[in-house]
Image (cartoon, rainbow, N blue to C red):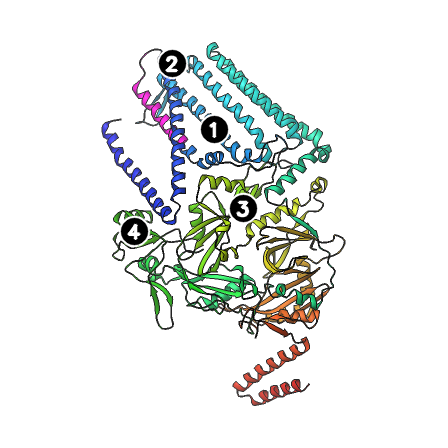
Amino acid sequence: MKYSQYLALIPVIIIIVFAALISFLGDYYWFDSVGYAGIFLNIIAVSVILGIIAAVVFFGFSYICARISLKSAANGGDVSVLNKRIVLLFCGLGALFGGLSVSSQWETVLMFLNQSPFGVLDPIFGLDAGFYVFSLPFFNLIANFVIGVVIFSIIVSFLGYLLESEILTLNFNEYPITEFKGQLKIDSFIPQLSVLLFFLFSAISARIWLARYDLLFTPGETVFGVGYTDATVTLPVMAVLTFVSFLIGIGFLINERLRRPEVIKYGVIIFIAVAVIGVIAGGVVQVLIVSPNEFNLEKPYLSHNINSTLVAYGLDDVDEKQFTVDYNLTNTDIIENSATVENIRLWDWRPLKTTYEQLQLFRTYYEFNDIDVDRYTFGDSYKQVLISAREMNIKDLPSQAQTWVNTHLVYTHGYGAVMSPVDVVSKEGLPDFYLKDIPPTSEYIELNQPGIYYGEGLDDYSVVMTKTEEFDYPSSDENIYTTYQGSGGVELSGILQRLIYAIKFKSVELLVSGSLDSDSRILMNRNILERADAVAPFLSYDSDPYVVVSEGRLFWIIDAYTSTGKFPYSATVQTSDYEEFNYLRNSAKVVIDAYNGDITYYIVNGNDPLIQAYNGIFPGAFKDFSEMPEDLRSHVRYPAGIFEIQSEVYSLYHMKDPRVFYNREDAWNVPDEVYRGSRQRMEPYYIIMKLPGEESEEFIQMLPFTPRSKENLIAWMAVRSDTPNYGGIVVYQFSKQELTYGPMQIEARIDQDTEISQDITLWSQSGSSVLRGNTLIIPIENSILYVEPLYLEATEKGTLPQLKRVIVAYGDRLTMKDTLAEALDEIFGDIAIERPVGGAGEGIGEGEEVEVLSSEVLDKLNRIAELYDSAQDALNKGDLGAYQRNIDQIGDIINS
């Protein structure tokens, strides 16, 4: 290569280095702004060190081998300078890729160095689970790296030998670039090849030995992990193959002196033959010995699988109880469990989201991304609520308004949140708002800082503290503007910072805009899930963050998980995004300030060895759960993501008897329910209730089970969210000899009820769509109450879903009424329970005993209201005759 060609590479190198520097500085400034520069620098430093070590070893070994082959082929003569450069180039490229591959394994190395024991021994080798989670991946990394280096060295050495022997020529100016000449003779290459094969088979021997441990988390035909065939055939064969591989390697080393090509050939044949014989032997044992007597032979291994899986998913300490349904619930029981009844979630989040959007967005550039479930204490009342943050959605700005200034400097943030109780419904069938409007108004809770600069739907960057005022919120006659007063963002104090982010975001405006000055800050990674993942990519995050109002501010809480696929004997779970693991813990909570973007990680499960390792790797990155502000701690909830996985695992692994498990005699299913006219899998739901045998109500998450292929209830699982019982799982099992209705059986009863089905049909024919909400299963005392709300939604676009009826089922009784109170009154008689004064929206925690009117009186009042509306319509139309007839009917009802 000519010097001019070398010079041509200089601009390319400069561009690559400049791009890397820009990327590094951009990331560093951001990590420093959020207080986690230590994590960033730690990962970078370890990655670079590992990459350099791996590249040096890779290059040094392969280049020495290549030079030896060149000298061997030269037969004592001078080695071609061109051939030296060719192998140098190949070795350099190999070292580059080898270094990059190892540098990406920084987590494997650091976890190995900071490991903690699990305190659980595997039943086959007697090793702590920490060996498989922390040590085995590191040992496999070393073995695989050595194998890769040796294989590459064989290839590049053989290439050098062919080039120097002039059997192969390379011409980069022609196509094809390779040309073979003469007959292939490798006699003088055999000694070096024999030595390299010794290294290769020694490394393969070590890798096979390590592969024995991998069997403990490999799925089998009957058992997840080592089964009978593995224990009696596969493991011994792998041990023999390990020994044979090493002996073959010794044979290759001896052949360095013998220089006989057939030694290499026969060594490889022997290795393959032993491996094939082992596979055949395993198949024969499985078919002829195991299959005819499968359960008896696999029984101990099934027990290992059951016990390990329960431990791996935190299900080994489930409190199992019997739940005997007696159907003797009285109105007194309802009154004594009034807190449970008052927190029955009548509002399904799906129609409620539409209602929120119609009533509380106010402008097209706002959006509600999600409806979250939480609980708050208002005075003496412990109340379950639904809440949603009002975020900015600049995509819905008119196209002519989507300028760079508007999208990045003006429309920078959302504003406020909306909150409503789960059970209160207005006369119009709409929610009662505890927090609403712009600016936020509430009788129950303070929100002094409603700005939302970080949220679920904020995917682009914003620049704040500029010469251009930010839009704050709309008012009746004019828009209100503001300037960011928070501490979030990276300072654009100089031309370097502006250049870095102009390149990063491909935005020349960041460099030339006159609206920016030395005080300006750029807010990035504003999507809270992406923000959390950017700081701690080694954790997994729940897909459902939720917003919390605390101390007058808005915060986001995200559940973070630690997981591994290396827990011995535990069954693997695959999530919807194809992530696989066989050990899972909700070990941390992430709190993000919606205004400042401050992000804090709290450890909630300090017993998890994985989070202990990360805490050791990144000292100071995590805080103890006790350091979380008390008010925020009261809003921590057990995440639905892990609860769904645990319930799925437990539906099978609650069968601790190996024979029952083997035959799947008592397998459970998560039941289906009806929504929008079609069946769908029931989701876990939060509820405030008093668990059987407990003294007071608490915030739990629950999910029922049905027997596999059947519709009746067999059990229900609850997980607790309030301290000091956070994370405690209780499973209540129903009697197998008595029928307890499941959700689909209740749905069938609703469909078969003549009066209810007629009403639904009439509503559907009158231009409305009937939405059936979640079928809620509410355990009260030793009974089960079923509640299903019905919503009406006009078919025209932009209409409001209204909660119009509530269906309640209890035992063999089924009723549909305007309100839950009326339905309960119909089933249990007159009930006096504690209710908010004046109904929806009038004082919470200052209740008085309000007697619910009998169903007969309520029916008369409803009829009077209907006649009054008809009379008003007639009067407006000038039909005085119809008006008088309606008034007369009202009088008749009153007099009766």
Do residues under tags 4 and 3 come within 8 Å of each other at their CB atoms? no
Compare marks 1 and 3 and give the one earlier in the sequence. Answer: 1
Q: Between label 1 and label 3, give the one nearer the viewer.
A: 3
Question: Residue 774 appears in which quarter of the rendering?
Answer: bottom right
Amino acid bearing label 2: Ser
Please tell me whether mark 4 sits on a helix, a strand or a loop: loop
Image quadrant where one finds the N terminus: top left
Q: Position of residue 56 (x, y in %)?
A: 38, 27
The local crowd at label 1, few if under 14, some if 14 to 19, many if 20 or more residues have their Cα within 10 Å, is some
Q: Position of residue 820 (x, y in %)?
A: 63, 69
| Left-right relation of 708 to 369 | right
Q: Nearer the viewer, residue 726 or 530?
A: 726
Do residues under tags 1 and 3 come within 8 Å of each other at their CB atoms? no
In the rendered image, residue 89 lying in the magenta stretch gets the answer yes
Magenta span: 76-99
Question: Residue 740 appears in which quarter of the rendering?
Answer: bottom right
| Left-right relation of 199 to 702 | left
Residue tagged 4: 492
Q: Which mark is residue 72?
A: 2
Compare marks 2 and 1 and give the one earlier in the sequence. Answer: 2
Is the residue 178 above or below the residue 472 in the image? above
Residue at screen point 58% across, 66% down:
423
Residue tagged 3: 605
Q: Spatial distance from mark 2 to mark 1, Cα to Cα?
A: 30 Å
